[in-house]
Image (tube, grey):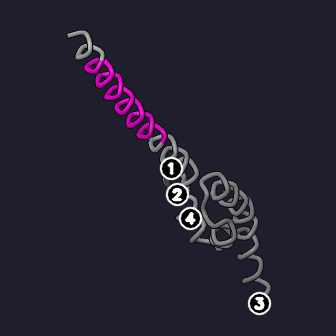
């Protein structure tokens, strides 16, 4: 029994730093922190979890990009409406002169 524990101790020692790395990556990328912390602690699975988190996209950044795109779309609609109003005003002014 002691041999099994002695063989398992290095895996736990290696898993603890991986757990903290997975936790910080999950926070940074807007993922479920508790889930990824637990997966980072399990030997064997933690390496795959770490690789996934390195390659995963950030939901926080995606949300910010979506907000920026929505604001740009609103600005385009505003400028196109403003341009149409100016053109209509010009036509009205030109029509009065004639």
Query: How many marks are shown on the rendered structure?
Result: 4
Label 1 element class: helix
Q: Tell me if 15 is positioned left or right of 29 in this view.
A: right
Q: Which residue is mark 4?
A: 49
Vertical relation: 98 (above or below) 7:
above
Q: Nearer the viewer, residue 75 or 57?
A: 75
Callout 4: 10 Å neighbours few (<14), some, many (20+)?
many
Vertical relation: 57 (above or below) 65:
below
Q: Which residue is mark 2?
A: 51
The label nearer to you, 1 versus 3, is: 1
**N-terminal-most mark, 3 or 2:** 3
The label nearer to you, 3 versus 4, is: 4
Vertical relation: 1 (above or below) 75:
below
Whether the residues at callouts 2 and 4 have beta carbons within 8 Å, the answer is: yes
Q: Which residue is mark 1?
A: 62
Q: Nearer the viewer, residue 33 or 39?
A: 33
Label 4 element class: helix
How far across and how far down the image is residue 74, in percent? Answer: 44, 40
Q: Which residue is mark 3?
A: 1
């Amino acid at each position: 029994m002691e041999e099994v524990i002695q063989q398992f101790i290095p895996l736990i020692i290696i898993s603890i730093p991986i757990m903290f790395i997975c936790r910080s990556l999950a926070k940074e990328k807007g993922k479920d922190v508790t889930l990824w912390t637990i997966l980072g602690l399990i030997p064997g699975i933690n390496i795959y979890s770490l690789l996934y988190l390195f390659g995963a996209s950030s939901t926080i950044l995606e949300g910010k990009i979506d907000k920026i795109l929505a604001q740009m779309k609103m600005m385009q609609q505003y400028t196109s409406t403003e341009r149409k109003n100016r053109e209509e005003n010009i036509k009205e002014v030109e029509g009065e002169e004639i």
